[in-house]
Image (cartoon, coloured by chain):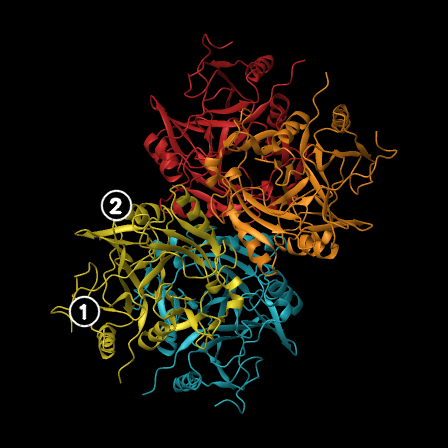
Chain colours: A cyan, B yellow, C red, D orange
């Protein structure tokens, strides 16, 4: 019998930016990601605690777009199984040959229901850190050096769909994401869902679009180990007039947050800590009504009336179908 | 086709103590666990962030023993599937009727290869916190009040087997625990393994026994959200002359630690934070040789030469087989 | 030759509250101050790290007022020297007999130029903590137990004068407070001053009154040792719907802050950490113009346009002159 | 009438090192001090929060010695007044012309009773940080960037005298240092004293010499704002195999500590946070007997039996008297 294919984790986010130099300064020098490799004008980065080849890529573009959001499967054969499943939904998939994206094996991309281009892969290189940056800890790729904000790893993505409830159902039925917490509006309609395949409260959050357009990207998040690391991040970014929101603590997910805008692109980054883990197999999703949102959206910190912020970046589009698309 | 049964998580640890009053003071008043319920002279406790009925129980006994270590399965039917598997190994199991242990459904117990009595269950009550202790956060059972050390949840157990390598293999083949990190001795034999079914580096660690006896309990751990919470714990316990080791940071698992002895029983508690999560399906277990242990055992903090401490508490014994044992 | 009299430190703040029970709950149970003693319906409290008899007193009153703000002198004879100085300014002083205020020796009170009633004292009792609350640390009065917000000591007061610049000059010429940082408005007039006799950036801050009335009390502050203690405080108070502002970090004074309102009285408390110490005898006061205030008032955290908040509590009035006033 | 001369603060420590390159790497790159200026082969450094020209200088030497420990006076005229006082004790002083030490005005040096060469100065330059390193905070010289351990400022020095009690009395009678805490041995003799002219628990600590030799330097300390910054420091230094002791918390002074050895010289640095401030003019020095030292020396953390460590660096010697010595 065939097992159901499964998603293991969020892998990486590929961004385009109209100002590559400034974006590189932001992600590498201020945030403190490690530059792993370049391929033409694409730059691959990862955090000091990450083993995979990259969790972020930056590529110059006319506009700031999210080229794709990549998910790793649990088993090699899940890539094809998911491709079949997507095709069976009437959606075309575009195959990505091994090595076409640096460090990554055979994969495929497609326009997801939330609106972003998703990439599904399994094979990935896990390059060691260069000797002069390698940690003495065998379980850590890079030396602990506290350079910049210095997050440990990518954590989650947050995006807007034409209809957040429809997108959440699609994420569940297609990829097995479970809803951990959600918000209903005054009419009882689900407008935001925090979903995961891991014990994290969310690997992905999906909400109704503020404009009605799908594919609006709200933010990607990197993890720091302590609340105080979030507040230290605030100190560092304030020296550079980076647009920010926070720091504070969400009620939903119980996460300490600080939102920043990449000054080169406007893509939003969340520096994220705290939160909690869900190991229960029978987790009852937490339902937040409008009455609860005064503590749900911001437990403490600067107030705002809704999760959806006032600034998003759009999804990129896949190239027109070509020979390698089936 | 039948799915393989799976373990979802560590559920609880049941301790006996020769000084119930002092142990209750330690776990409830100094550590800050919540007392949920009493059943005869057994007291059930849980941490402020836990939904299940209990993560710890205390019962008076002539000696300090670990009555059982309980693991929750992923599905209801996994309980019976695991019981069958244990019986097929030639080990007798003792069924626990629903409600026999407060808050818990039908379960079974048996003498595990590491030496502790394991309990396997699925059904469990998730009682709400009393109104006067309930959090305004819908995703949190108890009010945040910072009483005592105030850990969020149980994290892992650490124990000694007659042969740590044999026990680790048994944990893997029987319950699907994956080795995340391990130590080999000078002859290349595995002496300690950190293993998990979750993305935690370990739900359980198992090591060679310092005495050759199986079933020696090293510690159970509760999680706090920040490094600083570990150091705050050190302040609180020092006012009471609690035996302790730490604080410090392990290289293995990268965890901030503080070890305490329950003054009523000598059972050891680890206050634990930091560490990292493993989402990779193809995680390559980290191998620590003797040469690496100078950073592996204690990255920083007080030094010791090996993981195995100088004080353990024994496993309890199951009652003699009776009618309900098959 | 006579030495100039000198102020050593802020001693305590005496508050009246229309809801003593609720205020006591706030300061003792939620904030975690220690109740030292009662005298009639006046309750004396101090923080766990304080040796003096009290740093706060609560007394029932028809309205929330600040009965007095007390400053300790460096030498016993400074009390009379300061009384003479105040009288020489044409201001009447009211003597307070030893013991009239619990724990305190002979003192005097008067209406200060900032508008609050100031009390000047030297002699004060330093009672030990009760045995069951005493710390094992010889340099700490109370056991470290992390009860409530658990600040270590009183830090400073912040108030409004009819003219902040006039009040600052008076504080300097009368009591030797040095200006450490200050704000000028668009016309170059000093509107807010942070002043100290200690190396703290401020023992007292005084600003123009938002209403033109003198004697409006903005807040008193208690110190916690770490930034994270400020954020922990936010968790605790959110469970009780306390009105708050923050947390965040001021540019001026570089302090991590969380402002809370005592729900029984509306008096404002700042939980305060970070900041810096000034040991330089030739400190050049930091001048903040309106152009700098975007980082000066809030370095990071929720934004507001000026230091003066939207809620203050008035100063109490001294009783009419009687026999003991000269 | 003449006022007594007064010491305002610890100013800087001048070190010689047999391996300037390695020491510079340690203090500038790993600890994160800012290099201010070079004068020949002397390098001047300060922390990001310091306004004075330098708090540390490094100079190559055949051996690791403490060239001098510099104290700033409260008033310009105090320099000469203290010089007279030292001469009146029969000790020769060596004048240092303005500019002879970069950034510093006229000063004098002499062999102190504790054994180190002390320097007394008032005039000092307060250079701005270079534009590309300047903070947006007007009250902060350097940009907050979290580079290396990143302490805020120098805190204190700790040294050994032939007789710690005699040295402490001399520090009090000559310079006005007040004893804040002290240890007596079994015979009641004072063996260690923590002393300050500021509200810090100590600007200087002086103990009996483990060898009987005076002038053994134990450590200088730099301050970080939070406990967690101490533990972050431990992470950073562990990647480089720096000899260390800690982290932990002293009972005496209540300070979180981490001791490091400069690998180029063996001079010891303490990374220091926590502790408390003393504003009371009638502070009763805390007396620690041998019975109390189990909590006094190390409140929590790695244990040691006495404050005096097993490694010290000697004091330098003043050049032979020349024309500028009176």
Mark 1 is surrounded, within 10 Å at the Cα level, by few (under 14), some (14 to 19) or many (20 or more) other residues, namely: many
Return the mark for residue B21: 2
Residue D201: image location, x then y, percent: 56, 35
Q: Residue furthest top?
A: C323
Residue C177: image location, x then y, percent: 61, 27
Return the mark for residue B94: 1
First of labels 1, 2 by sequence position: 2
For this rendering, which residue is in front, D289 or D74? D289
Image quadrant where residue C253 sits: top right
Whether residue A215 appears in this view of the structure is: no
Residue B256: image location, x then y, percent: 46, 57
SS label for mark 1: strand
Say which chain tag 1 marks: B
Q: Residue furthest bottom?
A: A323
SS label for mark 2: helix
Q: Is residue A245 left or right of residue D177?
A: left
Mark 2 is surrounded, within 10 Å at the Cα level, by few (under 14), some (14 to 19) or many (20 or more) other residues, namely: few
């Amino acid at each position: 019998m065939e097992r159901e294919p499964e998603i293991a984790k969020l892998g990486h986010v590929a961004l385009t930016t109209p100002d590559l130099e400034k974006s590189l300064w932001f992600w590498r020098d201020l945030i403190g990601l490690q530059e792993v490799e370049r391929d033409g004008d694409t730059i691959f980065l990862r955090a000091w605690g990450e083993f995979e080849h990259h969790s972020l890529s930056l590529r110059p573009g006319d506009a700031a777009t999210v080229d794709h959001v990549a998910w790793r499967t649990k088993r090699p054969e899940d890539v094809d199984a998911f491709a079949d499943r997507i095709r069976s939904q009437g959606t075309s998939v575009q195959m990505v040959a091994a090595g076409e994206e640096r460090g990554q094996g055979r994969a495929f991309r497609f326009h997801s229901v939330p609106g972003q281009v998703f990439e599904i892969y399994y094979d990935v290189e896990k390059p060691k850190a260069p000797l002069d940056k390698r940690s003495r800890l065998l379980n850590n790729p890079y030396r602990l050096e506290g350079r910049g904000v210095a997050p440990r790893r990518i954590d989650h993505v947050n995006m807007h769909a034409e209809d957040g409830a429809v997108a959440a159902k699609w994420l569940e039925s297609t990829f097995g994401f479970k809803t951990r917490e959600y918000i209903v509006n005054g009419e009882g309609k689900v407008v935001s869902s925090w979903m995961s395949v891991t014990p994290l409260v969310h690997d992905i959050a999906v909400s109704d679009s503020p404009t009605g357009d799908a594919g609006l990207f709200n933010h990607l998040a990197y993890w720091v180990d302590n609340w105080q690391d979030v507040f230290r991040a605030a100190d560092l970014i304030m020296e550079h007039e980076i647009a920010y929101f926070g720091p504070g603590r969400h009620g939903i997910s119980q996460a300490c947050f600080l939102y920043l805008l990449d000054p080169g692109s406007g893509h939003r980054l969340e520096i994220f800590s705290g939160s909690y883990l869900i190991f229960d197999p029978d987790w009852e999703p937490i339902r937040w009504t409008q009455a609860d949102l005064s503590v749900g959206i911001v437990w403490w910190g600067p107030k705002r009336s809704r999760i959806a912020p006032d600034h998003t970046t759009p999804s990129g589009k896949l190239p027109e179908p070509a020979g390698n698309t089936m």
